[in-house]
Amino acid sequence: PLEKCPLFYQLALGHVNQEVYNFLASSGAKYGVGFWKPGSGIIHQIILENYAYPGVMLIGTDSHTPNGGGLGGICIGVGGADAVDVMAGIPWELKCPKVIGVKLTGTLSGWTSPKDIILKVAGILTVKGGTGAIVEYHGPGVDSISCTGMATICNMGAEIGATTSVFPYNHRMRTYLEKTGRADIAALAEEYKELLVPDTGCEYDQLIEINLNELKPHINGPFTPDLAHPVSSIGSVAEKNGWPLDVKVGLIGSCTNSSYEDMGRAASLAKQALDKGLKCKAKFTITPGSEQIRATIERDGYSKIFNDVGGVVLANACGPCIGQWDRRDVKKGEKNTIVTSFNRNFTARNDANPATHAFVTSPEIVTALAIAGTLKFNPETDYLTAPNGEKFKLQPPTGDELPARGFDPGQDTYQHPPSDGTGLRVDVNPQSNRLQLLEPFDKWNGRDLEDLQVLIKVKGKCTTDHISAAGPWLKFRGHLDNISNNLLIGAVNVENDAVNKIRNQLTGEFGGVPDVAREYKRNGVSWVVVGDENYGEGSSREHAALEPRHLGGRAIIVKSFARIHETNLKKQGLLPLTFADPADYEKIRPDDKISITGLKTFVPGKPLQAILKHSDGSKETIELNHTFNETQIEWFQAGSALNRMKELQK
């Protein structure tokens, strides 16, 4: 059928998204910025292949920007407003992080891969153990890891909350730079390599030691990337917990694991199965991270192997990793298991189905489990059965670190900026439902915030995926009002343990979170969100801060914040506040009104007060901490960082 034709799909997708591409291309041209066109791949892979280098400091508007740490760069994920500051020549600031050292000894071998290192670290530190810290890998075990393997580890450091992760410069980085056309940078790094490794006698705020000789393949999940299990035990753990054993889909690739080496090692396993007459029992998808990787694995025969074993090579894009997956093999609400080599596995992230049990592991293990079709398969010890009845074991995966014939660049997808774009216009249609110019938020009125209605008191984990869902919603990223219809639709309401069902205090009726927020806004009722630990972990997703501000939110009060989200909230003129006593979370009732006082004397380091007004007429006062500095207080007073930037230009 025509709709199954890849070319038809690409043309249809291009038509649907054309106005967005026109906007990006026209704005890049006007402001002298290069534009990687659709089909280029995932930006983190493009950065590694073209821009990152040892010693660079780079910020990017995604939590997986630290991928560049695989080339010895200090690459940090930030919100979009932070990037705007930098592009406008305003200094970027960050609270000085601690440094967690991870000492690696021994050598990677067999079924163990770089992914297993970060899966192990995630199990040790949990999703918030790296918050406020840079993770620095070091030790003799580093030399057994490829440059792209180091990038995998740094990329997924976002899942432990780390500010960034970094590896010391070594010969693996030099070889990668040379293979990607940057021999001059490699030579310069060699000249100054003593500056690109840990200082002699340096001390760490925390030290973790991992012996790679003893490290076993891991698989983490479901529903959180820090629930670590050895692959050898996941079958029995799944049985005990009632997790589905049948693997419905195996997915490899994404910005975390789409290197040439990853694809080669996965293809070596697929080839073994094919040689015995086997194909995958589970559905199997492969997502190249860049056009260069796609073209190279096609030239070198890996794509054919994947297709022959029953796999489907997808577009060079984030794809199912960020929810861009029109999944139809299970119904929404149907309990099932998928395994991926992605970085995150929060509830409903990949396919919008909250009943999908997603597990994160290496591409090699994903491939093996897709062939076997069950979590109970341990490729190190278990046998597969060929169609002729022969029992055989998969041999450990093998794959070249880099292509012997060099990389095939594929199609040229880069748009160079013009020498002068002053006469060009940024292309935005005022009637578009995909793009909308941002209107300035209102300034602080100089008074305390009185009688803020509790919009929702969130129970448990609340990531940026819960606050601003991805998947089909991503088409509205350029239209704040439309995307605001997903505000907190994934968060659990403490009042009824329900998702996207809160009580409208004006009517007494229950409704969706964005619907109630909109009614409060129409009636001039400002509101506050109350949350739990590590609120806003996960993707840097700036919309998770823009949406509450747009719909009338004034403050977010939680036990603790994830770093990027806290800064994003400040940038939009909201007050991200934490309980001085975390037990005060229990004092707030879903129908409370909260007044935040002390704003007239708002200064760094001085707590604010909250007066809780209960519906029974009683009141309580609690103390709220904040991390605002003087500049950030100016953002709040101006209504947003952009407003403040405009004030400074006058």
Image (cartoon, helix red, strand yellow):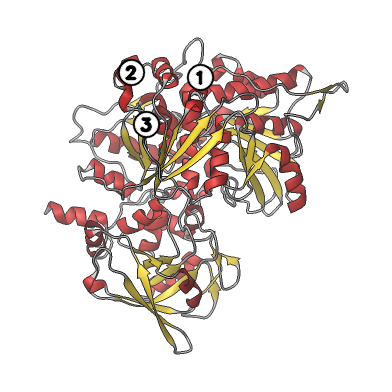
| Viewer-side residue, 510 vs 124 | 124
| Viewer-side residue, 100 vs 411 | 100
Residue 521's spot in the image, x, y percent? 38, 71
Q: Which residue is label 2 attached to?
A: 190
- Is 523 located above or below residue 320 in the figure? below
The residue positioned farthest toward the top in the image shown: 405
Mark 3–mark 1 Cα distance, whole angstroms, equals 37 Å
Q: Which residue is label 3 attached to?
A: 198
Which image quarter: residue 509?
bottom right
Viewer-side label of 2, 3: 3
- Give, as a three-letter code, the residue at label 3: Pro
Q: Which quadrant of the rendered structure holds the N terminus?
A: top right
Which image quarter: residue 249?
top right
Viewer-side label of 3, 1: 3
Instruction: State the SS at label 3.
Output: loop
Going from N to C along the chain, the mark reached first, 2 or 3, is 2
The residue positioned farthest toward the left in the image shown: 650
Residue 289's spot in the image, x, y percent? 50, 29
Instruction: State the SS at label 2.
Output: helix
- Give, as a three-letter code, the residue at label 2: Glu
Going from N to C along the chain, the mark reached first, 2 or 1, is 2
- Is 612 located above or below residue 215 in the figure? below
Residue 69's spot in the image, x, y percent? 41, 33
Name the side, left or right, on which 495 lies relative to 44. Answer: right
Q: Which residue is label 1 attached to?
A: 295
Q: Residues within 10 Å of mark 2 (few under 14, many from 20)?
A: some
